[in-house]
């Protein structure tokens, strides 16, 4: 039993999740999106889908170069950081395109007071989870859903807008990282660990149910990606192999999500675990077609020069304290935790067919 605290520390994987106002997004045209017309999208969760809710301070690196540098690598004179934790687009942008929108809806923080863009709103904050993470000080999933509820109750978001709405919920592992608020979890055995993961997944399902009762027509829910394959975990092995114990924690999480939501009407689980695994951690000769697009699957494109550094860090004199790959499209991961735009594009391509089938199904009252 003396090993249990060590085991749990390993399971509480350190995901270094941190997180311009854009013009009104277009609604689907006749030849875009699914046969059902989804004109609004509401986004909840963490850094996989945060497009600008974290403030522009030195604390949050996604507002600084090289984040948002995708266009610059293709000849643009000036890179534009938009608060996304990648070199350009993230998961929610690609999902939005499938719906027929131009990109993910504007962030809650950058939306003018008492208004909602026709394309919806993004409530997600990088670093968020089900439980509070004290050193992050960002809204939990429930707090985000409550903010959505207030806007709905005050008429800022109309009931009519919900009639053609889809929600995306992304919880990607902050609750299992060091620093999560688990002081009262009494974790001393594998049973306790399973119980804690069960509490996390139950809360996700609870918030999905609340969104549905409020009138959101369809809800997309991420399962847990293979967190043991992030560069944060593979760096210890020189980016050669995944952390099996961390991936085990992800599978426990995913089994719970499947049990709680697998048969829920109007909800669809986005199988990130399989999509990621088929690209970065498949057996020799197997894997998805998308896997062939990446020469470096476990190595980040943007890597800190020091052990305690981070992508985008600069010295007081302005010297870069990180290394940046020449072609981000050949790396699946952008930094120690988040995919490149090319990585996200490959993942969504793998998820697109079942997602479109789900969106084309009639709403079940």
Image (spheres, rainbow, N blue to C red):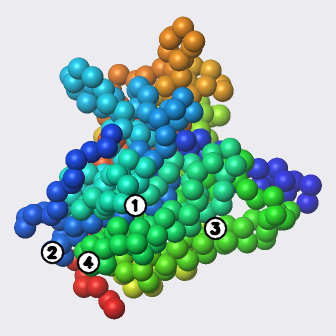
First-in-chain label (2 vs 3): 2
Q: Secondary structure at mark 2?
A: loop
Residue at the outermost top position: 317
Question: Which circle's residue, 3 or 1, is located before the other in the chain?
Answer: 1
Specify which label sits upstream in the sequence, 2 or 1.
2
Q: Which residue is mark 3?
A: 200
Asked if disc 4 and disc 3 are in contact, CB closer than 8 Å, the reply is no
> Which quadrant holds the C terminus?
bottom left
Outermost left residue: 30
Q: Which residue is under mark 1?
A: 43
- The location of residue 235, given as percent across then percent down, is 60, 33
- Residues 272 and 174: in front is 174
Determine the image quadrant of residue 162.
bottom left
Query: What secondary structure is marked by label 1?
Result: strand
- Viewport quadrant of the N terminus: bottom right
Residue 77 lies, with reference to residue 59, above or below; the image says above
Residue 188 visible, this angle: yes
Secondary structure beneath disc 3?
A: helix
Q: Which disc, if any, is residue 160?
A: 4
């Amino acid at each position: 039993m003396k090993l249990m605290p060590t085991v749990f520390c390993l399971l509480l994987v350190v995901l270094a999740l941190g997180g311009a106002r854009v013009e009104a997004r277009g609604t689907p045209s006749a030849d875009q999106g699914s046969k059902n017309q989804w004109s609004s999208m509401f986004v909840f969760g963490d850094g996989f889908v945060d497009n600008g809710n974290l403030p522009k301070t030195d604390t949050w690196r996604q507002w600084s170069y090289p984040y948002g540098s995708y266009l610059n690598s293709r000849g643009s004179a000036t890179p534009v950081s938009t608060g996304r934790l990648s070199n350009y687009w993230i998961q929610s942008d690609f999902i939005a395109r499938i719906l027929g929108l131009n990109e993910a809806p504007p962030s809650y923080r950058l939306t003018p007071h008492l208004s909602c863009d026709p394309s919806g709103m993004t409530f997600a904050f990088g670093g968020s989870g089900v439980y509070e993470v004290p050193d992050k000080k960002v809204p939990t999933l429930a707090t985000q859903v409550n903010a959505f509820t207030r806007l709905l109750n005050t008429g800022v978001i109309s009931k009519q807008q919900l009639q053609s709405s889809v929600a995306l919920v992304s919880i990607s592992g902050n609750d299992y990282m060091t620093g999560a608020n688990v002081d009262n979890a009494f974790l001393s055995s594998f049973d306790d660990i399973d119980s804690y993961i069960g509490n996390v997944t139950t809360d996700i399902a609870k918030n999905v149910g609340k969104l549905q009762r409020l009138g959101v027509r369809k809800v997309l829910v991420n399962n847990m990606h293979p967190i043991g394959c992030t560069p944060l975990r593979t760096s210890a092995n020189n980016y050669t192999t995944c952390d099996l114990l961390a991936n085990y924690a992800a599978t426990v999480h995913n089994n719970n999500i499947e049990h709680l939501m697998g048969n829920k009407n109007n909800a669809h689980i986005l199988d990130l675990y399989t999509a990621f695994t088929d690209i970065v951690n498949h057996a020799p000769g197997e894997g998805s077609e998308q896997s062939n697009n990446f020469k470096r699957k476990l190595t980040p494109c943007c890597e800190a020069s020091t052990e305690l550094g981070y992508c985008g860090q600069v010295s007081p004199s302005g010297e870069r304290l990180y290394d940046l790959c020449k072609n981000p499209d050949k790396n699946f991961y952008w930094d120690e935790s988040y995919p490149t735009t090319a990585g996200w594009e490959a993942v969504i391509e793998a998820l697109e067919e079942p997602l479109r089938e789900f969106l084309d199904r009639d709403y079940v009252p």
